[in-house]
Amino acid sequence: MSGFAYFLAVNLFLSTTASEILVGVMPQGKSHAASFMPLLQKLIQQGHNVTIYMENYGVGSLKGHANEWFINVTGHKDPFEDMEFARGIWYNMYTFMSHVKPFRYGSDSCTHVLNDHRDQFELIRNHGWDLILTDSLFAVCAYGLALLSPAHHIVMHSTDVESGYGISRGYSRNYLTMPTYFADFDDAYYEMTHFKDRLRNAYEWLGMSSALKIASNRFMQKALSPILQNFDISNYYADSAYIFSDMPLSVYTPMATNNELFMYGAYCQPYRSLTRELAEFVEDPSSRGTILIAFGTIVNWSAAPQQTQQAIADALNELSEYRIIWTHSACKHHLKRHIKLMQWMPQNDLLNHNRTKLFHTANESISSTKEGICATVPMLFIPLFAEQLRNAWLIERNGCGKTINKVNLTKDSLVHSMRQLITEPRYKENMQRLRAVYDDSPMPAIDEAAFKMNRLLKFGGRMPQLFYTRSINLSYFTVLNIDLIILIPLSLIFALCIK
């Protein structure tokens, strides 16, 4: 029997027993749920009963195949609908302290649930779950559900494992040699041989870990105090049975991994033919190709600087030889007929259309980045917040795209960058080469992730103890061998003193 056939046989055997799996995502976490959905759908196909828990403030159905057990929070505004945050996306530089605010929002949402919807929370808690998967970010009530349940829990990352979490798990990663999570917009380039860049990484590494374990944890601890005493996010993460990350390892920088971490993100989603209306628009004989523009659902255009909106509109108007599709609810600036506004567009379908030449985005989530790679379409980034600049840096480092600073973008810089990415063949060729590396694996990443999930279920939700990294139970002082390193100068001092 071939290795692949053996894998399929074992996977089929492990998936014959249906398990009850709960997936807890952040409040209004439609995008995070979408990141996890390909793996969840694979588990559903194998016969498991998968249910998504989310605090809902009107987002509606996720339209997936998973069950939905939402708590519809009433009488409160969505904590994440913050105009200060919406403006900050356009104006502010982001640091590790920026990560604290959304944890506070998630904690506020959990407080609403425990105060006003405790009965629904208890129903979910007392369901007979076999395994609980929780979002790594802001899913505070989901953490409470996981700790109160007898089932083991897994932490799901919609991007790479952040440094604060990596420290909690004892990963042997040197975060000083990896691209920063929150890069500077004015200095987005990173070179590990430069002392300045490593010093900046050290600052972020220590700051992000401290912000998570102290400031963010304080909000979560207070929110969960009615049901849990002294919640600690570091312990929650260290006690998880497994870590799954949607980051494709082939795109990221080389790093240490181990038994209980699997990065399954190197997969492509199927796409469909365009509707007749869209096909007629993009296949216009006079067009040189299609440009897609998507800034993500979290972007509030009313909070954007007027000069930025005007620069983008003027740049798009100048590119009249292309068909342009832009996700925008209500642009107030004059746009020519070659530009089509849509509240939502079938992004993956359009990216894979043979006339698409460029993907211009400010939504550099790893999901959108992967869609660009799968379609081998060069990408132009305007990073706005969080780890978007890091994701843009990864694509630019591979020669597949360019980045424009959100603070000082102009019409001319946009037009120049767009034309360069479309007309210079090297960007398309580099993207095709990256896609070839992306696809080169012994088996499909989603299938391997499902296999590992089934193996966990086979062992009751947690592998035998010998499977896990010993450094989880060691201090970082010991993991870095600092105790041994300082022994050398201490020994020298002692030797000099006794003389």
Image (cartoon, rainbow, N blue to C red):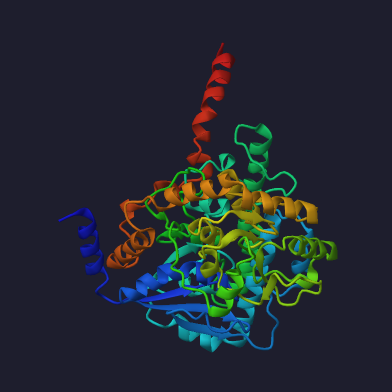
Q: In what quadrant of the picture does the C terminus appear?
A: top right
The quadrant in which residue 198 appears is top right
Relative horizontal placement of residue 365, taking residue 326 as reference (left or right):
left
Which residue is most to the front? Answer: 285
Rendered residue at 75%/67% (across/down): 85
Q: Is residue 242 above or below residue 36?
A: above
Which residue is most to the right? Answer: 307
**Residue 284 or 432: which is nearer the viewer?**
284
Q: Is residue 401 visible?
A: yes
* Number of callouts: 0
Q: Is residue 106 above or below residue 114?
A: above
Q: Which percent across, then down, holds residue 215?
A: 67, 60
Rendered residue at 62%/53% (across/down): 422
Which residue is most to the top? Answer: 499
Q: Which percent across, then down, holds residue 190?
A: 64, 40
Q: Which percent across, then down, holds residue 65?
A: 42, 80
Q: Is residue 175 above or below residue 294?
A: above
